[in-house]
Image (cartoon, grey):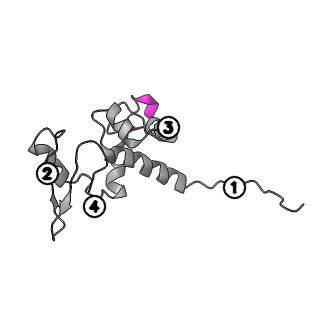
């Protein structure tokens, strides 16, 4: 199984569902492996929406209080714009060393939460000719 992102590959699971990982050349240390075991994306095991949304914060001193990722100067709006423009998550991750795949998922979860509460009435179109 391959992880989304640039660091973790080759995940397998034992009968208890624990991740059995091997290090690849881009991993810096065994700490990278342990970080994955503590809650990073593991195939079918992913963070729930509540945990993802904890990654989205607001600071009135940064971008006028727009939602940002983990207190950093990267707005959710910017990540969504890159995705809408066709950038892949992998490309975005390469551009921001500190960014994690879960941060991108958090942006999508945030957008989903916002849009889910909107009601937009589509225009009425007369199809009778």
Residue 22 bears which disc, if any?
A: 2
Residues under numbered marks 3 and 4 in contact, where contact means CB atoms less than 8 Å apart? no
Q: Secondary structure at mark 4?
A: loop
Residue 108 visible in the current orientation: yes
Give the number of the mark in front: 4 or 1.
4
Q: Are marks 2 and 4 in contact (CB under 8 Å)?
A: no
Which circle's residue, 2 or 1, is located before the other in the chain? 2
- Distance CA(mark 2)–CA(mark 3): 34 Å
Residue 35 location (% of width, % of height): 17, 48
The image position of residue 115, as x and y in percent, is: 54, 52
* Residue drawn 36% across the image and 41% down it: 90
Q: To which quarter of the image does residue 47 belong?
A: bottom left
Give the Cα distance between marks 3 and 4. 27 Å
The tag on residue 45 is 4
Magenta highlight range: 59-69
Q: Determine the residue located farthest toward the left in the rendered image.
A: 30
29 magenta-colored:
no
Residue at x 52%, y 37% (from the top left corner): 85
- Crowd around label 2: few <14 · some 14–19 · many ≥20 (10 Å): few
Q: Quick one: label 1, few (<14), some, or many (20+) residues within 10 Å?
A: few
Q: Earlier in the sequence, mark 2 or mark 3?
A: 2
């Amino acid at each position: 199984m391959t992880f989304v992102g640039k660091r973790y590959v080759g995940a397998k699971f034992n009968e208890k569902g624990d991740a059995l990982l091997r290090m690849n050349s881009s991993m810096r240390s065994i700490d990278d492996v342990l970080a994955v075991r503590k809650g990073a994306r593991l195939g079918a095991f992913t963070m729930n929406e509540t945990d993802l949304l904890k990654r989205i914060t607001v600071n009135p001193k940064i971008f006028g209080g727009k939602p940002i990722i983990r207190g950093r100067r990267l707005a959710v709006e910017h990540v969504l714009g890159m995705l809408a423009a066709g950038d892949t998550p992998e490309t975005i991750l390469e551009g921001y060393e500190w960014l994690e795949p879960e941060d991108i998922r958090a942006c999508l979860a945030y957008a989903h939460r916002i849009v889910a509460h909107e009601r937009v009435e589509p225009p009425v179109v007369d199809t009778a000719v």
